[in-house]
Image (cartoon, helix red, strand yellow):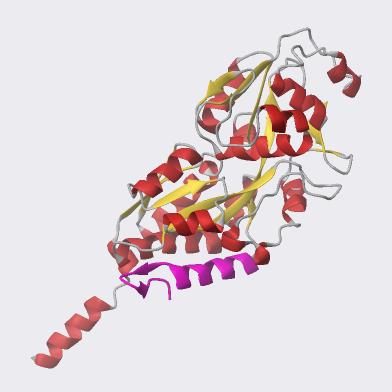
């Protein structure tokens, strides 16, 4: 009887801890929401675990993970190593993608309009007010540009997409850097606010003459027009997975403490200039092994099985070398009562 009891206990004990958890909860950046939602659906079908991810913006994701109201937070604003250590957090990248200026001007198709960094900045500063402005006409002599008022649409919430976009504008414009700056929420000179990438896409789709900025998947899924943008090499490039990959190719993740990486205004004639990575935040000290294991199992599954769906949405998957470094990071830092969770 004793040996039988030991055998039963052993069989129960070896059931994976992650399998005991039926739901994990996260919240944060809307930038990766299209691919996270597809990953969550596929993972639920494969493993039976529900992944509940709320697209509330990077600011909300950081606030909720700090408050420990979610199991993981999502952000496009990379935190520096000292910030992570102070908060008791780790971060790791999941995918990379492009932030894209989108517009609604009748008769002009996706990729037909060209903009320079200077003209784009002047539009968002409110210095260029109509679509037939001489500076826009000079760049687009073949387009029939109407005398329509430009309505700037920007984020109303704390946003990693805004952080990436304003980081780029601050790099290409001293005036923007001085007057507005780089943050998840800024004092916009002009414009109306939409909540999330979803809200900005919806407003641009409805408002004739509008321009905004979203992660590229939102432009594709909402059939919105997007610009060609001149990069630092002087080449006009379209937002594509290839142009995002070109920008991402310069990322030296091995020398990025805490995986801190900024990918805006990267070199390369084929590089899309407003590229960024998106991250997951977790507490180093976890309350229980089962939930922590379930979260890590989900993202491990995504790394191994999610590339095809990411690429279809024009996200750039992380290189294998980075995924290995992420696994090592989990092993060394995610613990319950001092014991490692990831084996």
Q: Residue at x 56, y 45 (%)?
A: 77
Q: How many marks?
A: 0
Q: Position of residue 117 (x, y in %)?
A: 80, 32
Name the one closer to the observer, 178 or 135.
178
Q: Is residue 128 above or below residue 285?
A: above
Q: Position of residue 218 (x, y in %)?
A: 60, 34
Task: Tell me where residue 102 sits by quadrant.
Answer: top right
Name the one closer to the observer, 45 or 243.
243
Q: Position of residue 202 (x, y in %)?
A: 55, 23
Residue 325 colored in magenta in the image: yes
Q: Residue at x 61, y 18 (%)?
A: 191
Q: Position of residue 39 (x, y in %)?
A: 49, 51
Name the one closer to the observer, 125 or 231.
125
- In this view, the residue farthest toward the top is 147
Asked if residue 48 can be seen in this view, the reply is: yes
Task: Tell me where residue 153 sits by quadrant.
Answer: top right
Q: Is residue 299 above or below residue 219?
A: below
């Amino acid at each position: 009887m004793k040996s039988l009891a030991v055998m039963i206990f052993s069989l129960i004990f070896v059931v994976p801890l992650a399998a005991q958890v039926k739901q994990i909860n996260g919240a944060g950046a809307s930038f990766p929401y299209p691919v996270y939602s597809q990953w969550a659906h596929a993972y639920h079908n494969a493993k039976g675990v529900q992944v509940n991810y709320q697209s509330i913006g990077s600011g909300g994701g950081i606030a909720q993970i700090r408050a420990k109201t979610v199991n993981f937070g999502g952000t496009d604003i990379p935190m520096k190593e000292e910030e992570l250590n102070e908060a008791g957090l780790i971060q790791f990248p999941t995918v990379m993608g492009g932030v894209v200026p989108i517009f609604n001007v009748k008769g002009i198709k996706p990729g037909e309009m060209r903009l320079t960094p200077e003209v784009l900045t002047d539009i968002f500063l409110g210095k260029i007010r109509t679509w037939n402005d001489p500076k826009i006409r000079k760049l687009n002599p073949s387009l029939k540009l109407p005398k329509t008022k430009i309505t700037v649409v920007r984020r109303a919430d704390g946003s990693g997409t805004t952080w990436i976009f304003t980081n780029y504008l601050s790099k290409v414009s001293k005036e923007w850097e001085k007057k507005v700056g780089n943050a998840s929420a800024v004092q916009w000179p002009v414009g109306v606010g939409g909540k999330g990438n979803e809200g900005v896409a919806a407003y641009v789709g409805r408002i004739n003459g509008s321009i905004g900025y979203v992660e590229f998947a939102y432009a594709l899924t909402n059939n919105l027009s997007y610009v060609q943008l001149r990069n630092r090499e002087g080449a006009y490039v379209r937002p594509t997975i290839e142009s995002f990959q070109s920008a991402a190719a310069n990322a030296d993740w091995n020398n990025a403490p805490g995986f801190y990486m900024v990918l805006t205004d990267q070199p390369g004639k084929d590089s899309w200039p407003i590229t960024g990575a998106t991250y997951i935040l977790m507490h180093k000290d976890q309350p229980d092994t089962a939930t922590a294991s379930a979260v890590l199992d989900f993202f491990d599954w995504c790394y191994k099985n999610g590339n095809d769906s990411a690429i279809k949405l024009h996200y750039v998957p992380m290189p294998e070398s980075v995924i290995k470094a992420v696994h090592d990071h989990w092993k060394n830092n995610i613990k319950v009562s001092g014991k490692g969770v990831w084996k």
